[in-house]
Amino acid sequence: MRLTYPFTAIVGQERMKRALLLNAVHPLIGGVLIRGERGTAKSTAARALAALLPDIEAVEGCPFSCHPDRPAGLCATCQRQPEANGSLPTVFRPTPFVDLPVSATEDRVVGTLDIEKAIRKGERHFEPGILAAANRGVLYVDEVNLLDDHVVDLLLDSAAMGVNVVEREGISVQHPARFVLVGSMNPEEGDLRPQLLDRFAHAVDVVGITEPRERVEILRRRMAFEQNPQQFYEEWADAEQEMGRRIIAARRAYEDVTYTQKDLYTIAALTASFNVDGHRADIVILKTARAQAAFDGRDHITDRDILLAAELALPHRMKKQPFQEAVLQPDQLDASMRQARAEAEQAYTDEDVAQEAQAGSTQVDEKKAPRAMTQK
C-alpha cells in the first residue's frame, strides 16, 4: 500500500490548507481553486486531504457510495433495493480520491446511458462516470485551466448542487455527487475565463516559501518521508487522526451554526465595498463562515469568521484592469471589514431584532435593540 504524505506535515501554505479543510467540512461551499507556481504542494495537499478523512460507511455494492442513513440522498438503485432487517447492507470504504485527467470527455465525467438498450428492451442502463466515483470524496483536477470549458461547467454545477443529472434522448438519470472539488493550475499556462473563475467558491494563490528555516524543514520532512514512508506517517498519525476528528465533528455541527441579521448586513456591505458582480460571493462567505465556526467548535459566526471567509471568496472576484493582478491586501480587507460592520450597525433596525426574536435566535444583541429603535 502506497502511503500519502500527511496533510498535517505540510509546511506553511496556511490559507490553502484552510480552504481545503473548510470545503471538507461542507462540500457544498463549492470547491477551491489553487493557483501557483510549480512545486508548491498543490497536488500533495489535495491527495493528503482525502487520506486525512476517515473511512466512509456506504451501501454495499453501490457505485455511488450512497450513505445508508440518508434516504433522501440515495440513488435509484439503493431506493429500490430490498431491505434486510430494516436496513441496507453496508461496508466501510476509504474516502474516494479521483484524479480527473485533462483529456476527460463529457461522457467519461458524467456517465453514459445505453440508448439502444433503452429503446429495444425498455431498460434504463446507466454506466457511472467520474462524478459517481468521486461522490463523498475528493475530485482533483490538475491543470484545470487546460480542461474543456464545458467539462469544467459540469464539474462546478455538480459541486454546487450535490447531484449529477444525465439526460439523453428523453431519458433522465440522476445520482448523488457531493464531493470536494479541488482544481489547481499554473497561471503561466493561461487563466480560466472569468465566468468559470467566479464559479469556484474559493481561490488561493500559493507561492514558494522563501524563509530559509521553513525551506530546510520542507526538505527535511520530504527526505524523511521518501526514506521511510511508514515511519514518517506513524510520526504524524496522531495529528492526522485529530484533524480528521475535527472535520467530522464540524460536519455534524455545521447545520447548528447560527448567524444574525447583523452578520448578513456585514457580509453584504463587505462584498459591495469591493464591487464584486452578482451575489455568489455573499453566499460563499456565509457558508464558509459557518464552516469556520463549526471547525473552531462554536455555534455562531463572528466577525473573524467573516473576515477569514472573505480572504478565500473575494480575491478572484475583484474587478481589475487589463494586465493588473487582483491582490487583496490584509490591511485593505481589515479596513473594509470595519467599515462594513459600522454600516451594519447603522442598518440594523428594530424590525430585524423582532424577526430574529420571532425566529428564536439566541444571538440577538439586546443592547443594540433600543438604540436601533431610536434610530428608526
Image (cartoon, rainbow, N blue to C red):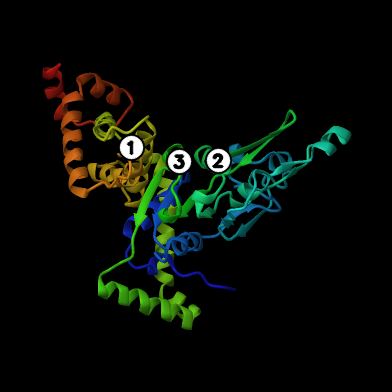
N-terminal label among 3 and 2: 2
- Residue 245, picture quadrant: bottom left
N-terminal label among 1 and 3: 3
Three-letter amino acid code at the position of disc 2: Ser
Do labels 1 and 3 touch, CB within 8 Å? Answer: no
State the image coordinates of residue 156 (x, y, percent, origin top left).
51, 41
CA gap between label 2 and label 1 equals 26 Å
**Quadrant for the N terminus in the image:** bottom right
Q: Is residue 313 left or right of residue 212?
A: right
CA gap between label 3 and label 2 equals 19 Å
The secondary element bearing badge 3 is classed as loop
Residue of label 3: 193
Task: Indicate which disc residue 158 carries.
Answer: 2
Residue situated furthest top in the rendering:
376
Three-letter amino acid code at the position of disc 1: Thr
Residue of label 1: 258
Residues packed near mark 2 inside 10 Å, few (<14), some (14 to 19) or many (20 plus): many
